[in-house]
Amino acid sequence: MSDDAIKDITIIGAGPTGLFAAFYAGLRGVSCRIVDALPQLGGQLMALYPEKYIFDVGGLPKILAKDLAKNMIEQGTQFGPEVVLEAEVQQLIPEDGHIRLVTRKGEFLTRTVIITAGKGALNPRVLECPGWSEHHNETGGAHTHVRQPEDFRGKRVLIVGGGDSAVDWVLGLRGIAKEVTVIHRRDEFRAHRSSVLEMRQAAEKGEVSIKTPYETRGIHGDNGCISRVTIFNNDTSEEEDLQVDAVVALLGFKPDLGPIGQWGLALERNTIKVSQLMETNISGVYAAGDVVHYPGKLELIATGYGEAAVAVNNAVHHINPKARVSPGHSTNLKQFKQDEGEE
Ligand SMILES: Cc1cc2nc3c(=O)[nH]c(=O)nc-3n(C[C@H](O)[C@H](O)[C@H](O)COP(=O)(O)OP(=O)(O)OC[C@H]3O[C@@H](n4cnc5c(N)ncnc54)[C@H](O)[C@@H]3O)c2cc1C
């Protein structure tokens, strides 16, 4: 691996704290890489509650989580950080003069690390029924994400779940998939009220099919492809078979600090202990956002922003002790084509 590949700062976790840290790294003029286990940027905002309104971010009286994520991505990637997705960081190994990060997508060298891993890698919940694991592979037809709607064109799709993602994809695959059926173990859906209404109207028009209160009992296939799913009615205890080509389980995420717990970091109650400078006990490794603990810590987006700025400015000073910790005011910075000399 060449020296060019060594970034000044690598950020582990692309939630609001990590994205703000990426912005700040650019503001300080250092090279930056952002790595996340998920296939998209945005952390909990996109993975857990994209359709919910947030009211407590300064300057934004009311904003949908997905819109805040969009703004944060625009701000956080404006200086061109390297973005690596679907790459859970498995190991963090301090070496001579740099740190090595090991992921399934390869190894990355960096001078400093900022861990903004929230509650840990948000691993999608899967169906606990026979047949899931055999078909949950590249070609098998059992999925935990919809990457591209076109992957489902002309197919009979069963969506399992009752939250925003499930309802959004019932609507999103309508007209693309040959048939869309959703099952949920309760009669009430937890998704945004207007989306549930739209889905019920689509069902009345025969565009989609809604079956509640149902759970999956087994996924069956021929030659590695799904052909049929057995579902179970929680009220009547009766089973029935649905002829489908694909199953998409959209059941939320299991937070898990996972590999981070094995990196030799000082931890307290599943969070990383940090100093007031957001330093961990490992030299050159900082942490910020939901993943950290200190007396008085609040797990809020607003807190994560401040912590990200502290972490990045101290990481910059760690890399180059001559660099000031204080960044100055963005209103005066040349990166934004402002006059640096004036206050
Ligand atoms: C339903 C709900 C509503 C909320 N409403 C509000 C609100 O109104 N206001 C508010 O301020 N806060 C709210 N929060 C909390 C807020 O979302 C969190 O405080 C915020 O998302 C924390 O940001 P973060 O960047 O620290 O972590 P996260 O958003 O959790 O992002 C962490 C990222 O790190 C990645 N990651 C973890 N481990 C690894 C690894 N080993 N390798 C690679 N990637 C990894 C994860 O995949 C994830 O994308 C809400 C939370 C929920 C669940």
Image (tube, rainbow, N blue to C red):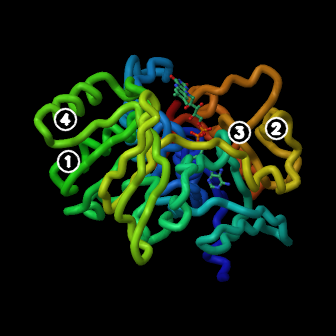
Q: Is residue 178 above or below residue 59?
A: below
Q: Amino acid at mark 2?
A: Val
SS for dot 1: loop
Give whichever of 233, 88 is nearer the camera: 233
> Can residue 161 be seen in this snapshot?
no
Q: Is residue 194 above or below residue 261?
A: above
User: Disc 2 marks which residue?
Assistant: 274
Q: CA distance from mark 2 to mark 4?
A: 51 Å
- From the viewer's perspective, tell me whether residue 164 is left or right of residue 152: right
> Residue 90, percent across and down?
72, 62
Residue 291 tag number: 3
Foreground tag (2 vs 4): 4
Q: Amino acid at mark 3?
A: Val
Q: How many marks?
A: 4
Residue occupying image coordinates x 13% and y 39%: 206
Foreground tag (4 vs 3): 4
Q: CA distance from mark 3 to mark 1?
A: 38 Å
Q: CA distance from mark 4 to mark 3?
A: 41 Å
Quadrant where the N terminus sits is bottom right
> Residue 266, percent across and down?
88, 44
> Residue 297, percent across and down?
74, 24
> Can residue 63 be seen in this snapshot?
yes
Residue 17 tag number: none
Crowding at dot 3, Cα within 10 Å, few <14 / some 14-19 / many 20+, comes out as many
